[in-house]
Image (cartoon, helix red, strand yellow):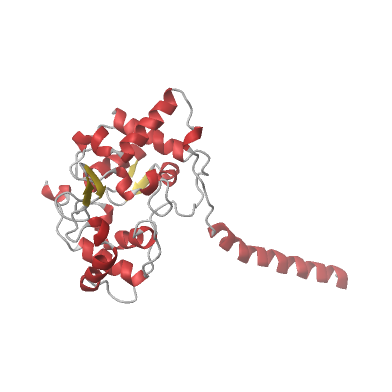
Amino acid sequence: MKIGPTLLVLASGLILFSGSRGLASPALAQEPATFQPPSDSEIPSDPFGNLVRKGERIFTQTRTYAGKYVGNDLTCESCHLDRGRKPYAAPLWGAYVSYPRFRSKNHKVSRLGERIQGCFRFSMNGTPPPLDSDIIRSLVAYSFWMSRGAPVGVKLAGARMYKMPPPHRTPDPFRGKKVYAAKCALCHGADGLGTTSGHDVAFPPVWGPRSYNMGAGLAKVSKLAGFVKMNMPLSKGSSLTDQQSWDVAAYVDSQPRPADPRKRQ
């Protein structure tokens, strides 16, 4: 059977068109979607809404509402900025839709409540509240509310910590010390022990006995560098170069802090 020239041209066009779609679609699939969490005014006035509001209070004033489980001067908001809303600061709206998930840290599939327990144990150098406690239930409810409308299984821009590209030079604590003195000491103190306003912690300590321990995520230079790059100095994220972010993270994480509780045991 002979194929006419018109059909041949059409067939060739279809092959080229389908081929170009096949090449373009992976790039489109990798483009992260954006998400905006609901506003506070949308929290319902019912028992669920009360649980959400309680979760927000625990989140922002952790030492006041969950003090028996906290072993330092940090709150949940110390790492998850703007009440857990800020992109690239491990926002709550990115957390809820990504659990349960496997974590290499404990080599198991963790639920969100278990992940929150880990925050108390490592980032706040404290004791994990029971999974069935009002504290965990409230924080999970708050996270659930923040993620309302977020798509599941879709890559969201800013849903986790920023992953830094490899540094051009090995991160250097000596260079980082200069960056810290110029950009960080005003808030976190020249000694890294944080600053206070009255009886309240204005800016949390970044090393020392009242900071996160060696088992916390930010105790990894790569994690801290990504956090610094996108969020520090506060309200001036992305103002440091990549190398400055790597260097200051290396300096901060080279300073003394509580031991990893898994090693203490």
Residue in the picture at 18% in, 54% down: 193
Residue 52 shown left or right of residue 79 in the figure: right
Residue in the picture at 39% in, 47% down: 82
Residue 5 visible somewhere in the drawing: yes
Residue in the picture at 77% in, 70% down: 12
Which residue appears farthest toward the front when viewing the image? 198
Which residue appears farthest toward the bottom when viewing the image? 169
Q: Residue 164 location, x and y as percent? A: 37, 65
Is residue 86 positioned above or below 222 on the image? above
Q: Residue 49 location, x and y as percent? A: 44, 28
Locate the N terminus by quadrant.
Answer: bottom right
In this rendered view, identify the residue nearer to me: 35 or 1: 35
Quadrant of the rendered structure where residue 145 is?
Answer: top left
Is residue 65 positioned above or below 123 on the image? above
Residue in the picture at 44% in, 44% down: 93
In this rendered view, identify the residue nearer to me: 122 or 45: 45
* Numbered disc total: 0
Which residue appears farthest toward the top when viewing the image? 47
